[in-house]
Amino acid sequence: MTPAVTAAKIDLSELDRHRPYLLKFAMLQLRQKDAAEDVVQDVFLAALKGAQGFAGRSSVRTWLTSILLNKIADYRARAQRETSLDARQEQDAESVDALFQANGTYVSMPQEWRNPEEALGDRRFFEALERCLEGLSPRDARTFLLRELMGLSIDEICKETGVSATNCSVILHRARMRLRACLEARWFAGAAET
């Protein structure tokens, strides 16, 4: 369908066509299948209730994705109230600290990535990246995806997540360090052998 879909033309089959995309997006953000399915279901309920407000100025997928982002934010706000922030930060700091010696040097030097651009064209690379993202805390994965996938600025991420700019930078650094170590083990080490 074209972006000029009118509210009257949105039906369950139109919404259901976007389910795989929305579910994958929610899984990357939430990393829990049950939570992702619940959030996507909430998106469909909100879309059906608000279909008359859809003016067709964007594609249905874009409209649904914006609803999904709001539902994910709501889910995270509820979940954050239930989890101790200090405990999560302590665990994250310990896992990144394990990559360095007491003098600040790497425990083991990062591997040279022979051809990163070539890896971006390989579907298996993105599967390895998804598995590595699952190893991050939900907060770190979300912050990384907001910055690197969605291209938000640090200020925008701070508004979205409620953390300070300094804390956001630390979160991004830790996420990148852990992702690099994971990708070296799951992807680039295997690519070097073949």
Image: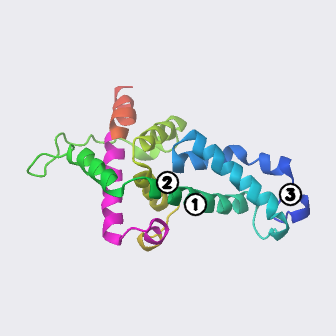
Q: Residues within 10 Å of mark 3 (few under 14, many from 20)?
A: some
Instruction: Tell me whether the residue at label 1 lies in contact with that at label 2, contact meaning CB atoms closer than 8 angstroms.
Output: no
Which residues are the magenta region? 157-181
Residue 6 visible from this viewpoint: no
Q: Which disc is residue 74 wearing?
A: 1
Residue 19 spot, x, y in % from top left: 72, 46
Per the image, is 159 magenta?
A: yes
Q: Residues within 10 Å of mark 1 (few under 14, many from 20)?
A: few
Q: Secondary structure at mark 3?
A: loop
What is the quadrant of residue 187 in the picture?
top left
Q: Amino acid at mark 2?
A: Ala
From the viewer's side, name the closer residue of 30 and 172. Answer: 30
Instruction: Determine the residue positioned at 25% across, 48% down.
Output: 96
Location of residue 133 with respect to 69 vertically, above or below: above
Location of residue 7 with respect to 27 vertically, above or below: below
Q: Amino acid at mark 3?
A: Ile
| Disc on the earlier residue, 2 or 3 | 3
- Is 168 left or right of 71, judged from the image as shown? left
- Is 72 left or right of 9, judged from the image as shown? left
| Disc on the earlier residue, 1 or 3 | 3
- In the picture of the structure, the residue carrying the numbered disc 2 is 79
- Quadrant location of the N terminus in the rendered image: bottom right
Q: Amino acid at mark 1?
A: Asp
Residue 74 spot, x, y in % from top left: 57, 60
- In the picture of the structure, the residue carrying the numbered disc 3 is 10
Q: Secondary structure at mark 1?
A: helix
